[in-house]
Image (spheres, rainbow, N blue to C red):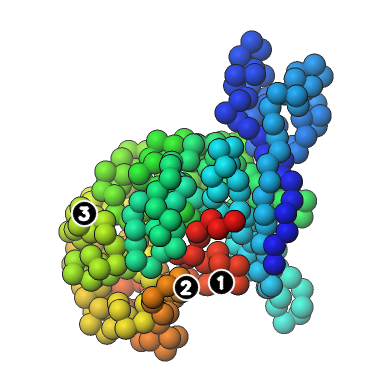
Amino acid sequence: MGFRISIEIVDLSKLETILAGEPAYRAKQAREAVFGSLIDDWSQARELPENLRQKLAAECSLDINAEIFHSKDGASAKALITLADGAKIETVLMRHGSRPRASLAFQAGRNTVCVSSQVGCPMGCAFCATGKMGFKRNLSADEIAEQVLLFARILKKEGRRVDNVVFMGMGEPFLNYANVMAAVKILNDQRGLNIGGRHISISTCGVVEGIEKLVDEPIQVNLAISLHAPNDALRSKLMPINAKYPLKKPVETIAHYIERTNRRVMLEYIMIDKVNDSDDCARELADLVKTRLSPKLAFVNLIRYNPTGEFLASPPERVKAFKDILMKAGVETTERYRFGRQIKAACGQLAAKS
């Protein structure tokens, strides 16, 4: 079910221009008001003089249309955002631990926002709805950060906050590296949303240059790689990127990343019925992790496929058998909860259809 609302979102691209003639600290105050206090009207920015508040209200549009879709269980919400140039992107809020316990009392759990980094995606993965859109353009740092800001303002009304951010929405983050990392700095800013680096995760299809750059970043975000196959033959059928970056390249780069940072890496693996979910695939994947990576610092996250076209999801018993093989081989394995299926907001389903 969806409904259209008017959400206050600052046009940050205009903010610095408007404040160009003001003392430098005014820009700092304005951004703190937007990302720290989460104001939804410039009149609420009391630290700014009234004439400046009026100027910002007149010249810096705070208004965009966002269509919000809520799942029936209340565990997730998808926002369809229209950008200034008419392009559309999707972002998702996932409420962890919000389902009732036996006492019928709801637990106030964590809130994770899944953000997009591009309009469309150039990667063309066979199982992904976004890839079928093709690539339109990169998002700016502000356009990325504002996706989190949208849900932060909604959660504020509930007395809650955004706890985690994952770059697992539309687009390949490492093909928009500079803007993604600039957005991370905005999200991480202690005077603003104050989301710790360990609570921000970036998922890549295997763009090795991006992984190499991430090694030296001062903000220690989490790294995930969309693996989805344990060998080149199968991965090439599912992910065209494998032609440019055969499996050996991202695996070697991840091994180097682990060696340099001593940080964990998540290997994402979508379970597709009778495609990549066989016992042989599980054994091959276990061997890859144990011999070419580190079983202590690389772990597998299994994701039941959310149908977007020709494929079907692996049945639960097949996922369990696959997981058991990995675990018995000594590879830590988790299984992702399937958020957002009712509102087409689950993994691989974001397509920005108006």
* Mark 3 → mark 2, Cα distance in angstroms: 25 Å
Q: Earlier in the sequence, mark 1 or mark 3?
A: 3
What is the three-letter code of the residue carrying label 1?
Arg
Kindly identify the residue that appears in the image at 49 percent across and 65 percent down: 349
Position of 2 relative to 157 (above/below): below
Q: What element carries label 3?
A: loop
Q: For residue 98, say whether it is visible.
A: no
- Number of numbered discs present? 3
* Mark 2 → mark 1, Cα distance in angstroms: 7 Å
Q: Badge 3 is on which residue? A: 245
Q: Badge 1 is on which residue? A: 341
> Would you call the spot at circle 1 few (<14 residues within 10 Å), some (14-19), or many (20 or more)?
some
x then y, percent, for residue 92? 58, 57
* Mark 3 in CB contact with mark 2 (< 8 angstroms): no
With 142 as the anchor, is 104 left or right in this view?
right
* Mark 2 in CB contact with mark 1 (< 8 angstroms): yes
With 127 as the anchor, is 100 left or right in this view?
right
> Would you call the spot at circle 2 few (<14 residues within 10 Å), some (14-19), or many (20 or more)?
many
Q: Which of 258 and 248 is in front in this view?
A: 248
Q: For residue 238, say whether it is visible.
A: yes
Position of 303 relative to 214 (above/below): below
Kindly identify the residue that appears in the image at 26 percent across and 43 percent down: 209
What is the three-letter code of the residue carrying label 2?
Asn
* Mark 1 → mark 3, Cα distance in angstroms: 31 Å
Q: Badge 2 is on which residue? A: 306
